[in-house]
Image: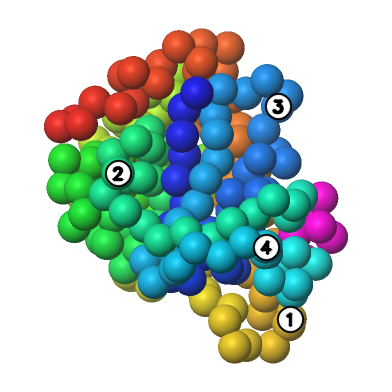
Amino acid sequence: MIRVLFVCTGNVHRSALAERLLAARLPRGSALRPESAGTQAWPRPGMEHSTRAVLERLGGDGSGFVSRPLTAQLVLESALVLGLAGEHREAAVRLAPSALRRCFTLKEFVRLAGGEPDGAGRRPDGAADLAAVVAAAAARRGHMAPVPLEADDVEDPRGRPSAVLSGCAREIDDLVRSLARLCEDPVTAQVGAVLRIRDG
């Protein structure tokens, strides 16, 4: 099992959507296990009604969801940590500095790994497995043309009109579809140990 951890602030909208939408887009039997947490979250069962409604319209399953706070242990146990904004990636790295090379924003990872949201999601440089995709994305960080910091953020829909939440969900769905394509590989189930190398 290879854990992919999505992080936002409250773990009620963005990261919850990313977790459950990726679960819906992965092939049956995938070794990946999407999870989520929030930098300011607290344990509470059930998904917010508005989030669950938009999730289910996109084909996701909101049952059994429990929000939870981000911890160092969650970061260290995850093969890949994907913040929904730069502040979430930074929070994960502060909790577990050795995980730096496995922490990205969702948009940043898709961009660096070569899987634009509306593109083919091909692995960079013919990389053969997910471990190589993560390593290549980490290596490209700092060597590609920079983008504005906010360009790697998914807008927080909290307290905004329902149309903003719907747009946020569609954007996340496009991104996790690309992520799922990047992750699809027959040897993915065998690379978890490589991905969990703590010091990169």
At label 4, which amino acid type do we have?
Gly
Q: Secondary structure at mark 3?
A: loop
Q: Position of residue 105 (x, y in %)?
A: 39, 55
Magenta run includes residue 58: yes
Report which residue position mark 1 lands on: 163
Residue 46: which numbered mark, if any?
A: 4
Report which residue position mark 3 lands on: 27
C-alpha distance separating marks 2 and 4: 23 Å
| Mark 3 burial class by Cα count in 10 Å: few <14, some 14-19, many 20+ | few
C-alpha distance separating marks 3 and 1: 29 Å
Compared with 132, 113 (above or below) is below
Task: Tell me, yes or no, if residue 106 can be seen here.
Answer: no
Residue 73: which numbered mark, if any?
A: 2
Q: Position of residue 3 (x, y in %)?
A: 46, 34
At label 1, which amino acid type do we have?
Ala
User: Mark 1 or 2 closer to N-term?
Assistant: 2
